[in-house]
Amino acid sequence: MKILAINLSDIQGGAARAAYRIHQCLRQQGIDSSMLVNVALSGDWTVQGPTVKWDKFATRFRPHAGAMAWRLLRTSNLSLHSPAILPSYWPDRLNKSDADVVHLHWICGEMLSISDIGRLRKPLVWTLHDMWAFCGAEHYTEDFRWRDGYRKSNRPDYEHGFDLNCWTWERKRKYWRRPMHIVTPSNWLADCVRESALMSDWTVSVVPYFIDSNVWQPVDKMVARKILGLPQDAPLLLFGAMGGISDPRKGFDLLQKALDHLRGEFRGMELVIFGQLTPKFPLDLGFPTHYMGHLYDDISLSLLYSAADAYVLPSRQDNLPNTGIEAHACGTPVIGFNIGGVPDIVSHLKTGYVAKAFDPVDLAEGIRWVLTDLARNLQLRKSARIRACSEWSSDVVTKGYYQAYSSAISSQYF
């Protein structure tokens, strides 16, 4: 079985890292997988970026052309939207390949257009890393037009101008006549697919992300803290996200409210934030705060997770966040809300704490529960590591994808 995976990048961004890990996992298990990307950064010979001058130019030009087109549409909320308008050379290349299955990952917007996806003729498996595939142009949304259909009558009040989401959704309905085999990393996202107006009758499987437990593993806490220059004795609470505290979807404001509840009663705790350098005007969070900046390599991140006593994941929306899986693989308990794929990661009171959705008081209780009892924290760390090794292993992930590939191939001929 020859698999051709396609993603915008190999290691730039959370979805890219997840896609590349799946690709590596399949190769480790003997499946002939190769990867095509617009931005190749890993140096891996099994990953190929653009090689022809025109393709390289088109890759650089597409994001700028797309941004200009969005502005001309005079619509709102473009920062997290992908209308996926501009055609590319990818359909011809993929259709002419000798692959048995084309495995799509995060390809919307800057890689394939909606009509491009409809032109693909190979058996298709599509791993969703967010909600875009069954929404309009949104990658995440809090309304339910994706479930009810995009109509003028149910457009949110906060949108104005041209209805980009409705137009994008209608184009998907027009061009995607042939169902694809959908894979989601979390049960939450699978349920969304099944409830969606666009994909409710498509086949969907749940296959988690892969984490290499030989690479991501616990490091002695005191050693990790010494290397990173973190205090040896204080309870450390870790938070991280692309862009640090600036992304509302990652819920830092909810964490801030939880920390307000802990002020004055949880002495000694310190906060560690990665994904952001120390700001010019640091927030008063009520606890000493260490900003670690951007960490890109697995070794540095493993040290950071190992140095922490707990990782907090206060997201409002999330699929199956890599950071939660990485933390568990390093033996670090995770505290998060009962939303999205968080319950797929955290076993409540066994590997961490699952708080009531968007409840800062319960999130504060989770932080207190995980950090105040040393013996409990040690047991949580052991259980988190065991869960990572069993739930997100190469055997589990490869079996799930092999079944999805086989299903896609067999359905191609009926």
Image (cartoon, grey):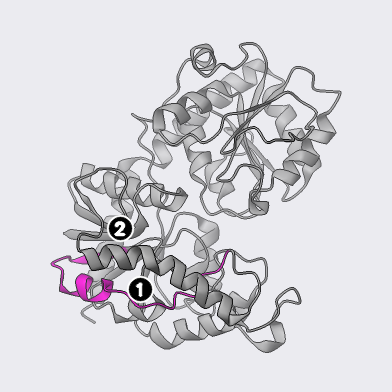
Residue 335 in the figure: left or right of residue 304: right
Taking 405 as reference, is 278 above or below it?
above
Name the residue furthest left. 98
The mark lying in front, picked from 1 and 2, is 2
Q: Position of residue 112 (x, y in %)?
A: 36, 71
**Label 1 neighbour load within 10 Å: few <14, some 14-19, many 20+:** some
* Among the 4 quarters of the image, the one containing residue 299: top left
Give the residue displayed 52% in from the left and 61% down from the top: 189
Q: Position of residue 49 (x, y in %)?
A: 26, 56
Instruction: Kindly identify which residue carries mark 1.
Output: 180
Tag count: 2
Label 2: element kind: strand
* Among the 4 quarters of the image, the one containing residue 211: top left
Q: Is residue 332 visible?
A: yes
Instruction: Kindly identify which residue carries mark 2.
Output: 37
Q: Quadrant of the C terminus?
A: bottom left
The magenta segment: 80-103
Give the residue displayed 80% in from the left and 28% down from the top: 286
Q: Quote the CA–CA distance across marks 1 and 2.
A: 21 Å
Magenta segment: does it hold 102? yes
Residue 41 in the figure: left or right of residue 364: left
Taking 44 as reference, is 144 above or below it?
below
Q: Which amino acid is tagged 2?
A: Val
Q: Which amino acid is tagged 1?
A: Met
Give the residue displayed 31% in from the left and 56% down from the top: 401
Q: Nearer the viewer, residue 53 or 350?
A: 53
Give the mark nearer the N terminus: 1 vs 2: 2
Magenta segment: does it hold 390? no
Mark 1 and mark 2 residues within 8 Å of each other at the beta carbon: no
Give the residue displayed 49% in from the left and 12% down from the top: 223
**Label 2 neighbour load within 10 Å: few <14, some 14-19, many 20+:** many
